[in-house]
Amino acid sequence: MKQYGLDLIVTIANRSRIDAFLDIYRAHGLTFNVTANARGTASPEALRILGLEDSEKAMLFSACEHPSVKAIIRDAILKMRIDVPGNGILVTVPFSAFAGGRAYQYMIYGQLKEGDDPMAKLQEERKDEFKPDYHLIVCVTNEGFSDTVMDAAREVGASGGTIIRARGTAKEQAEKFFGVSLATEKEMLFIVATNDQRDPIMKNIVKKAGFETEAKSIVFSLPVDQIAGLRRLPNMED
């Protein structure tokens, strides 16, 4: 498992609980935290498996230096009982690039210790090969087509996902590049999938709601390093 770098912690929980997660992360020095309201798509049975009891949820995106992630997950388990179904789900995703050193410094500002050189940290290499057990599938689709995307994902094994509203930018440039008219209003779907599930889910979304359809979906995946809130917790040590 990797030992260096910066991770994105993605926390999905009922809206009434998200502030408590935020308090934990701030206590660990995390200063880059972004929240967004969301709604779930899973069936009641799938919600129980994923650790979510209702569809009124929020997503919290936080930047954390990788060595600190395990302690934060332990706090989420001890204080928020995220390992118990109904209390949320947490995944970590490694950042692969930053748009300039200032962006990196901004994201780790609260985690710097006296004497730390942020640019030296940026140059630190991850010395271990990273082979994730889970992936975070992200789909950006035209507004109103999230159900179509989720139906396609469920056909090949997805339990459920989380949806947030979004807005596209650079509309004129995108239309010129793709040669079609693109809707500005978007929806983003987030689906946690295993290695075996990832490719079939992504392929079926492209087939049923891809760029050749009205949904005009763009799909990509991110490697998940650690995960909490599912019944199986890979990469977690005692």
Image: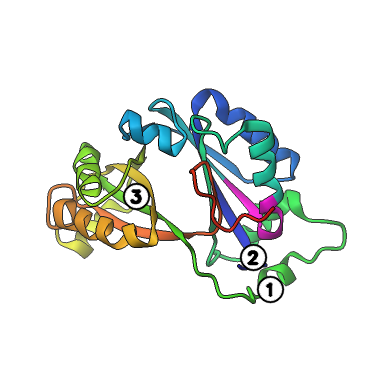
Q: Is residue 139 visible?
A: yes
The amino acid at mark 1 is Glu
Real-space CA distance between mark 1 and mark 3, rounded to the nearest whole angstrom = 33 Å
Q: Earlier in the sequence, mark 2 or mark 1?
A: 2
Q: Which residue is rendered at x = 22% and y = 64% of the image? A: 177
Residue range highlighted in magenta? 62-70
The answer to whether the residue labelled 2 contacts the one labelled 1, judged by CB atoms less than 8 Å apart, is yes
The amino acid at mark 3 is Thr
Give the mark toward the camera: 3 or 2. Answer: 2
* SS category of the residue bearing label 3: loop
Q: Around disc 2, counting alpha carbons within 10 Å, would you say few (fewer than 14), some (14 to 19), or many (20 or more)? A: some
- Point out residue 89 in the picture as x, y percentages from the top left corner: 50, 40
Residue 124 shows which numbered tag?
1
Give the mark toward the camera: 1 or 3. Answer: 1
Q: Which residue is rendered at x = 12% and y = 57% of the image? A: 212
Residue 5 shows which numbered tag?
2
